[in-house]
Image: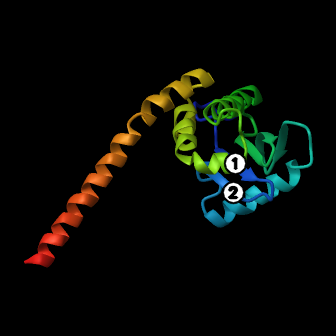
Amino acid sequence: QTEPSLYTVKAVLILDNDGDRLYAKYYDDTYPTVKEQKAFEKNIFNKTHRTDSEIALLEGLTVVYKSNIDLFFYVIGSSHENELMLMAVLNCLFDSLSQMLRKNVERRALLENMEGLFLAVDEIVDGGVILESDPQQVVHRVALRGDDVPLTEQTVTQVLQSAKEQIKWSLLR
């Protein structure tokens, strides 16, 4: 009998319709190398992409998943993990992205909004611990954190500009 822990999520994955990784975050060292991770990802994709069910047991893990257009979303937990908790994470992630991408949850839109995806996953799961399952809260926090983005872009531009100025001056000397 293993002690129940707060660490409920082992990985969050998004694969495309060829089973290739678009996003993967592993929270423990069940699959310590990228090679092992990719093999695992191929395996779950092969086992799930033709089925309509939402839960699979694979390699001693609980896998909950859903697909949309050309994306496959997976949340992975240990075999004794509560599927409902994993499902809550999956649905929260999907619904958050759906709002952020204005319901356009497909590969191209996702790739154009990877930063939002990274922020969203971090709001939902931290170090494997489930923090949030309400998509409204996630979208709200991502928007707050996203508001900092134009500022950082501006800062980068300023830094580049001043670097250019300095180079110009050093060439003129």
Return the residue found at the far front: 172
Q: Is residue 154 left or right of residue 23?
A: left
- Residue 139 in the image, given as x and y percentages of width and height: 56, 28
Quick check: 33 above or below 172?
A: above
> Along the line of sight, which residue is nearer the eye, 36 or 113?
113
Residue density around tag 1, few if under 14, some if 14–19, many if 20 or more, within 10 Å: many
Please report contact status of discs 1 and 2: CB closer than 8 Å, yes or no: yes
Q: Quadrant of the C terminus?
A: bottom left
Quarter of the figure with the N terminus: top right
Nearer to the camera, 89 or 157: 157
Q: Position of residue 89 (x, y in %)?
A: 67, 31
In the displayed structure, would residue 168 be above or below residue 142? below
**For marks 1 and 2 on the same chain, the one whose residue lies earlier in the sequence:** 1
Q: Secondary structure at mark 1?
A: strand
Q: Residue visible at 73% across and 52% down?
A: 15
Could you tell me the amino acid type at mark 2?
Answer: Arg
Q: Residue sitting at 57 percent across and 32 percent down?
A: 124
Between residue 15 and residue 158, name the one nearer to us: 158
Q: Position of residue 151 (x, y in %)?
A: 33, 41
Numbered disc total: 2
Q: Residue at x 52, y 40 (%)?
A: 127
Chosen colour scheme: rainbow
Residue 61, compared with residue 145, is above or below; it is: below
Write down the residue under mark 1.
14
Q: Residues within 10 Å of mark 2 (few under 14, many from 20)?
A: some
Q: Which mark is residue 21?
A: 2
